[in-house]
Amino acid sequence: MHILAIETSCDETSVAVVRDGQEILSDKIASQVELHKKYGGIVPEIASRKHVEVINPLIKEALEAAKVDFKQIDAVAVTYGPGLVGSLMVGICAAKAIAWSLDRPLIAVNHLEGHIYANFLVPSSKSQVPQFPFICLIVSGGHTMLVLVKEHGDYQTLGRTRDDAAGEAFDKVARFLKIGYPGGPIIDLLAKRGNPHAIEFKRPMMEKEFGYDFSFSGIKTAVVNYVSKQSGVSSKQVTDLVASFQQAIVDVLVEKTIRAAKEYHCSWVALAGGVSANSLLRESLKTRAKKEQLMVSAPPLALCTDNAAMIAGAAYHKLKQGKISDLTITAVASLRL
Ligand code: KG4
Ligand code: ZN
């Protein structure tokens, strides 16, 4: 079973061919980071134009790399939300055209569901695939949420951010400190040289009354206030600052994930989304989970950020459950899980 998947929800055009929901034959990604860098964030109009430019050559590349031709494609999958409408539409139109011309099923996939399914790809051993039910922490540039995954396609959202997503906080702090874009990977690297306890930022919404909701805009403001009180910050102070900021965010994410696993009697926790590439988050969750005798699944780094292979992974299970879309699907910017 070969699924051709297309992902264009944000600033990455990606096309993948995945066999049987697990084996990645190709996963081509055309990143637009360089294009948006000078604006310090994504410019939606520029993003959709770039998707239009690269989508067709990328489809060709993905098929060639997979050594599969159109005739061998059994189904076509595409992200239909959440994301930028103009960007999503480019992928949706391409996917519809291919599905229609090949007369193959079209499967519309929620981007967040795709992130979860990054955990089911390329398993080097069966034991690395999370077992149901499990808790998934989805942390990306647009979302931060804790989800109880009961079965394939059966989700219960336990909590989400009330303001900034974790990745958004990383990106905004990096922009404020003028250390580069996107902020997450840069802070991850810089923080390795800093003291994570130099500044004890308040860990927000840890009290039980907040359940599994998050809030990260307060820490971001605390960083801004800290810098405003100093007369300039040295590079040593910047590394301590980002290390302390990252530690505060990771502490909250890990604590709530473990808490949820215990409350919902899950023996597995999984990470998903761009921020799950964060080295401190991966290490801390593993260490904490070990103490609690929980198993951890985290996608390989390349599959944490946006890619089309994860969309194919999710689509495979939808197809098995008969969840096929028709050609009337359209982009849903604020699609929920
Ligand atoms: O999942 P993703 O590629 O796109 C969305 O769906 O949003 O996530 C992008 C986010 C960005 O905010 C980026 O700064 C963050 O993931 N990110 C990281 C790391 N790598 C990417 N954040 C923290 N540490 C990282 N190593
Ligand atoms: Zn994403």
Image (spheres, helix red, strand yellow):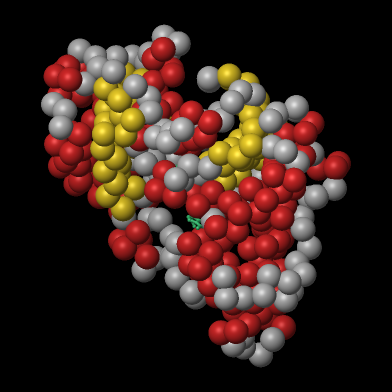
> Position of 271 compared to 291: left or right?
left
What percent of the width, then of the height, locates residue 251? 71, 55
What percent of the width, then of the height, locates residue 94? 23, 30
Task: Examine the image and state in which quarter residue 90 appears.
Answer: top left
Q: Quadrant of the C terminus?
A: top right
Q: Is residue 162 visible?
A: no
> Position of 90 compared to 213: left or right?
left
Check the image and name the residue furthest to the bottom.
Answer: 231
The correct choice, above or below, for 278 with respect to 212 in the image is: below
Q: Is residue 273 visible?
A: yes
Q: In front here: 207 or 302?
A: 302
> Position of 127 compared to 74: left or right?
right
What percent of the width, then of the height, locates residue 30? 27, 49
Task: Examine the image and state in which quarter residue 309 appears.
Answer: top left
Check the image and name the residue furthest to the top.
Answer: 322
Q: In front here: 218 or 27?
A: 27
Q: Residue at x 49, y 49 (%)?
A: 274
What percent of the width, then of the height, locates residue 171? 52, 61
Q: Quadrant of the N terminus?
A: top left
Task: Examine the image and state in which quarter residue 209 appears.
Answer: top right
